[in-house]
């Protein structure tokens, strides 16, 4: 029996799970508002990208097999991250180049896996959201979502329907913020230079809110903005799209 | 330590120095963005650009699958035209061959067009040690030769140098000119360098150039320049030596045209470079000018080992520099930090391939995998994929730093055990969330010094998503 056409598994991602569950609940709301039946398979931990990008191919495959097994049987797998979705979509099939059976399963999963905002617009045909947010926002194009999955116009299209929100483009929105997973701790000096430039461009856009589709980049940018005393808040794009901006922003204290 | 000795293993120290160097930072900031805008403009003006990239890629893939065939065909054509082909396996053999030719014609001076392969072999130092004076005739190369440096960019060798530095360099070097002359305009510096180099063109007995391509169909070598210096370097002296590596071969003139159409657009945003020169061998009886002797030194230096390996696609590289122009890491630190001949993403793949992963292993690690290099590469080389392959080779050879390896091991242990992972992340985030709640983040955190040295670490909200989800949905 084929699965419910809108039975969606949420791939929460390790960063959202640990650092910002509200992003997961915002994703959940957007998916349910669009008529999806959402589940969050209990066996999920991480997509394995840290191991894959560190050259540990065996560990990557072990974790990928676990993800593939846990997420089979859903019509779609959706992640609030272009980076993690790209790992499943692009890297999993490459990991199993020499194992035909697993490769077939990896490809099948890859074909059903999506980054959330592009899933809403491109697969479900969502063209507007019911949300408001009084802010001047700028949107950072996270690298994997942009280059591996073609996420560029979709978030901007939906943000344009958020009441009260003005979108002001920053210079070099497509240039990496310097996070890069383990890169930011392996090469902190270069990473710092990159996020310094990014923070300057965010400020230059006259924005009081920076949005992106990946929590890693957001934590990096938010951490730099807060360290340098810039009054710019950072949020995941789905928080704004879901109208769930009553929580403190990323890295923002609460009394 | 000479300028040509590899310093890639000191990458982290090189990076610190480059970030602290106000001149490098100023120079990178003022030139870097120009290349990006110009390439984008050239691409946008040509609807078939991406289709041409596919064709260029296919040309080189075909060559690499049939390399011996085309090399032999090329050699035969050069011989037919009266030229000589010298096969060299190592940089040392190539240098000795150049010296042998210079000695035979009793050369004291060698003029050089821009050649990155001569940087691989350390030709300038070698010739100097043997009493022969090499003169770089490309303006950027001339500047860095005067500074005793190596190129920091494969097509813009002096991109790391500021205008005031060049001003001072010229006044200190060209001491026969009036000290108070006006050098405020770039064009006045260019005119001065041109006047000095013009004289040198007539003094050299041998001219050495690189080759952007070698054409099997015709036996021609092709160079692409904007200053015309390459043409004068190769046509005025008695002897022209082409120093090139094996993978420069293309089958036909048509194929060369395909590559040319993507090369300058990707490099500088020009439709064509100002000069594109085809050399067909020594001067024939009916030719008004040209060299008496024509030699091609075909250097391997590790290329044949890359054929058939997971790094073979790197041999498609046409040295346009687009990857480094678009690389945020290269733009932050400049080319010298990479510590050897080739910087940026292409250097991060080539350096470990050519001089070993022990020396060059840092370079493929110093990437966020942002993918911009692959996005702009005219030959569609999967640079991030190959950098990752180097990381995998390091991991297999146990060259990955112990702390990183250990951290990865601990993380993998939990990631592979969802139940344990749930409990551990839940406990850790509860503690971190409580500690960081008031301020929203941490200015310092154990084991995260690399992060908190430069930015705050945002505090987690508290409970994990999965725990909250289980509470709300009853673990559905």
Image (tube, rainbow, N blue to C red):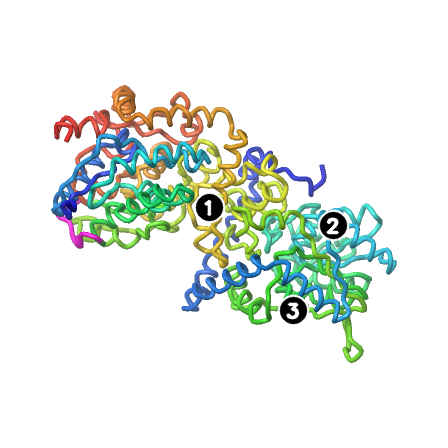
Label 1 neighbour load within 10 Å: few <14, some 14-19, many 20+? many
Residue in the image at 29% along x and 31% along y: A45
What is the x, y in percent for residue B429?
Answer: 27, 23
Q: Say if A7 sits above or below B433 in the image.
A: below
**Secondary structure beneath label 2:** helix
Identify which residue is drawn at 47% across, 62% down: B53
Chain letter of mark 1 equals B
Instruction: Estimate the spatial distance between the alpha carbons at disc 3 and disc 2, rounded to whole Å.
Output: 23 Å
The part of the image, by quadrant, that contains residue B375 is bottom left
- Percent of width and height locating residue B16: 55, 34
Asked if both marks, 3 and 2, belong to the same chain, the answer given is yes
Chain to which mark 2 belongs: B
The answer to whether mark 1 and mark 2 are in CB contact below 8 A is no
What is the chain letter for disc 3?
A: B
Nearest to the observer: residue A218 or residue B395: B395
Q: Which residue is mark 3?
A: B277
Residue range highlighted in magenta: A123-134
- In primary-sequence order, the first of circles 1 and 2 is 2
Please tell me whether residue B270 belongs to the stretch shown in magenta.
no
Task: Please tell me whether residue B447 is drawn above or below residue B394 in the rendered image.
Answer: above
Numbered circle sitting on residue B384: 1
Relative horizontal placement of residue B84, taking residue B375 as reference (left or right): right
Reading the image, the residue beneath label 2 is: B123
Give the image location of residue A86, x and y in percent: 34, 45
Magenta segment, prevailing SS (helix, strand or loop): loop
Q: Nearer the viewer, residue B49 or A187?
A: B49
């Amino acid at each position: 029996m084929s699965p419910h056409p809108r039975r969606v598994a949420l791939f929460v991602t390790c960063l959202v799970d640990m650092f910002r569950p509200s992003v997961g609940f915002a994703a959940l709301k957007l998916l349910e508002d669009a008529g999806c039946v959402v589940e969050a398979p209990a066996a999920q931990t991480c997509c394995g990208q840290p191991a894959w990008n560190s050259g540990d191919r065996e560990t990557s495959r072990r974790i990928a097999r676990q993800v593939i097994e846990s997420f089979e049987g859903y019509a779609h797998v959706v992640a609030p991250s272009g980076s993690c979705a790209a790992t499943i979509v692009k890297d999993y099939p490459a990991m199993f180049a020499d194992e035909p059976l697993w490769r077939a399963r990896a490809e099948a999963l890859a074909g059903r896996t999506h980054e959330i905002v592009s899933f809403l617009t491109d697969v479900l045909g969502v063209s507007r959201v019911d949300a408001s947010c009084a802010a001047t926002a700028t949107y950072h194009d996270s690298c994997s979502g942009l280059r591996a999955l073609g996420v560029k116009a979709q978030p901007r299209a939906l943000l344009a329907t958020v009441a009260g929100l003005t979108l002001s483009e920053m210079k070099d929105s497509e240039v990496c913020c310097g996070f890069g997973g383990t890169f930011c701790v392996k090469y902190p000096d270069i990473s710092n230079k990159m996020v310094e430039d990014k923070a300057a461009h965010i400020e230059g856009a006259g924005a009081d809110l920076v949005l992106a589709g990946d929590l890693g980049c957001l934590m990096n940018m938010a951490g730099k903005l807060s360290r340098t005393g810039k009054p710019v808040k950072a949020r995941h794009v789905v928080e704004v799209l879901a109208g769930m901006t009553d929580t403190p922003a990323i890295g923002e204290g609460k009394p | 330590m000479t300028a040509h000795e590899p310093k890639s293993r000191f990458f982290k120290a090189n990076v610190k120095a480059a970030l602290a160097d106000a001149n490098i930072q100023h120079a990178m900031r003022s030139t870097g963005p120009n290349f990006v805008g110009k390439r984008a403009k050239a691409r946008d003006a040509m609807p078939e650009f991406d289709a041409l990239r596919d064709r260029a890629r296919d040309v080189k893939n075909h060559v690499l699958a049939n390399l011996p065939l085309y090399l032999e065909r090329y050699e035969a054509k050069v011989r037919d035209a009266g030229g000589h082909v010298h096969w060299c396996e190592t940089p040392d053999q190539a240098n000795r061959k150049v010296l042998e030719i210079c000695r035979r014609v009793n050369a004291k001076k060698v003029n050089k067009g821009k050649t990155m392969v001569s940087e691989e072999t350390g030709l300038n130092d070698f010739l100097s040690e043997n009493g022969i004076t090499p003169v770089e005739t490309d303006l950027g190369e001339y500047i860095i030769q005067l500074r005793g440096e190596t190129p920091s960019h494969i097509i813009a060798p002096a991109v790391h140098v500021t205008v005031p530095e060049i001003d001072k360099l010229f006044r200190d070097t060209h001491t026969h000119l009036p000290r108070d002359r006006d050098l405020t305009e770039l064009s006045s510096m260019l005119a001065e360098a041109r006047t000095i180099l013009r004289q040198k063109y007539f003094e050299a007995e041998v001219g050495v150039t690189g080759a952007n391509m070698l054409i099997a169909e015709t036996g021609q070598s092709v160079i692409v320049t904007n200053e015309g210096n390459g043409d004068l370097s190769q046509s005025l002296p008695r002897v022209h030596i082409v120093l090139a590596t094996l993978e420069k071969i293309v089958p036909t003139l048509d194929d060369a045209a395909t590559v040319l159409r993507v090369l300058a657009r990707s490099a500088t945003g020009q439709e064509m470079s100002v000069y594109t020169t085809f050399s067909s061998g020594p001067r024939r009886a009916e030719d008004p000018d040209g060299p008496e002797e024509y030699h091609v030194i075909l250097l391997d230096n590790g290329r044949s080992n890359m054929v058939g390996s997971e790094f073979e696609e790197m041999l498609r590289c046409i040295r346009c520099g687009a990857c480094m122009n678009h690389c945020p890491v290269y733009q932050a630190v400049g080319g010298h930090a990479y510590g050897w001949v080739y910087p940026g993403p292409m250097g991060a793949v080539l350096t470990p391939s050519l001089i070993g992963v022990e020396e060059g292993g840092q370079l493929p690690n110093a990437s966020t995998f942002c993918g911009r290099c692959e996005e702009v590469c005219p030959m569609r080389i999967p640079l991030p994929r190959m950098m990752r392959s180097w990381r995998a080779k390091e991991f297999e050879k146990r060259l990955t730093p112990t702390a990183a390896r250990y951290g990865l091991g601990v993380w993998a242990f939990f990631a592979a055990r969802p139940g344990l992972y749930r409990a551990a992340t839940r406990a850790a985030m509860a503690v971190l969330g409580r500690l960081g709640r008031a301020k929203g983040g941490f200015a310092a955190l154990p084991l995260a010094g690399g992060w908190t040295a430069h930015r705050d670490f945002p505090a987690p909200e508290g409970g994990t998503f999965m725990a909250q989800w289980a509470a709300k949905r009853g673990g559905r």
